[in-house]
Image (cartoon, grey):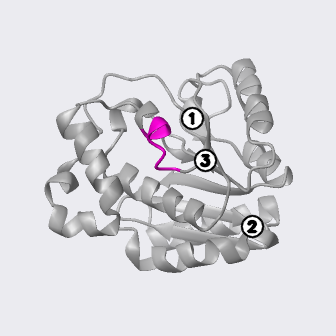
Amino acid sequence: MKDQYFGDVNDYCKYRLLRSLTRAGLSLGVCWMLTEPDGRTDGKHLGYLDKPRQHRQADPELFEWLQTAIHRDRDRRTARIEASGLLGDAIFQTRILRDDSVGRLSYFAHCQELFRGRDLVFFDPDNGLERSKRPGNRGSSKYIYWPEVEATFASGASVLIYQHFPREERTGFIARMKAELQARTGAAEIEAIPTSHVLFLFAAHERHRASIAPTVAAGQTFYR
């Protein structure tokens, strides 16, 4: 996650999803995996805010809050959503993650302590799950690595992961990611919610299945 993306259409989907899960009674840990701004001009997918008839009804309170943050206050910082109360009693990992293998170990050790006892931990990497970069290599901070997912799940928390779609056929990609997440975690339930641009992957413990189920069912058609 980069602050330059704050409030874009993917964030709207993300926050709606997290709000649905907190309303279902799940205690939430949010690992933003914040990375430094890179000077690029993307993160401007804000046109949805100018189409309230199409998008506001999904979550009026959130939609209006984002309109204020982006259009009136012009403040694109992830810290805004943390302070808003819109994500209930969520706990946040706010530290910057860098391309440093030693620093990364400290970062995720801190996550383990911070999120101890949380029902669900959400990982929000720039790109998604690891592909070919080794931890510590340039650009590695943009990914969550399988051992980090496995350790979080093993600690007792269900896991939710933000994943960008790569340039491959989406149905096959979703099936492959679900299968690997199942193999890696042994979760009681593996689910995926695709949106127009990104994919949300769930690995759920048995005791959380009933809480997650309504959000997943709605998400198959709602999170677009």
The stretch drawn in magenta includes residue 163:
no
Q: Determine the residue positioned at 80% across, 43% down.
A: 116
Which region is colored magenta?
Answer: 81-87
Specify few, some or many for label 2: CA neighbours under 10 Å numbering under 14, 14-19, or 20 or more: some
Of the residues shown, which amino acid type is indicated by label 1?
Met
Q: Nearer the viewer, residue 221 or 53?
A: 53
Distance of label 2 from label 3 (alpha carbons) = 29 Å
> What secondary structure is found at the residue carrying circle 2?
helix
Of the residues shown, which amino acid type is indicated by label 3?
Asp
Name the mark nearer the viewer: 1 or 3. Answer: 3
Q: Return the residue at label 3.
A: 89
Q: Return the residue at label 2.
A: 182
Specify few, some or many for label 3: CA neighbours under 10 Å numbering under 14, 14-19, or 20 or more: few
Q: Which of the two discs, 2 and 3, labels the residue nearer the N terminus?
A: 3
> What secondary structure is found at the residue carrying circle 1?
loop
Of the residues shown, which amino acid type is indicated by label 2?
Gln
Q: Determine the residue positioned at 80% across, 34% down.
A: 113
The stretch drawn in magenta includes residue 82:
yes
Q: Which of the two discs, 1 and 3, labels the residue nearer the N terminus?
A: 1
Name the mark nearer the viewer: 2 or 3. Answer: 3
Q: Which mark is residue 33?
A: 1
> What secondary structure is found at the residue carrying circle 3?
loop
Specify few, some or many for label 1: CA neighbours under 10 Å numbering under 14, 14-19, or 20 or more: many
- Give the answer, above or below, for where 46 lies relative to 6: below
Q: Which mark is residue 162?
A: none
Q: Position of residue 68 (x, y in %)?
A: 24, 42
Distance of label 1 from label 3 (alpha carbons) = 19 Å
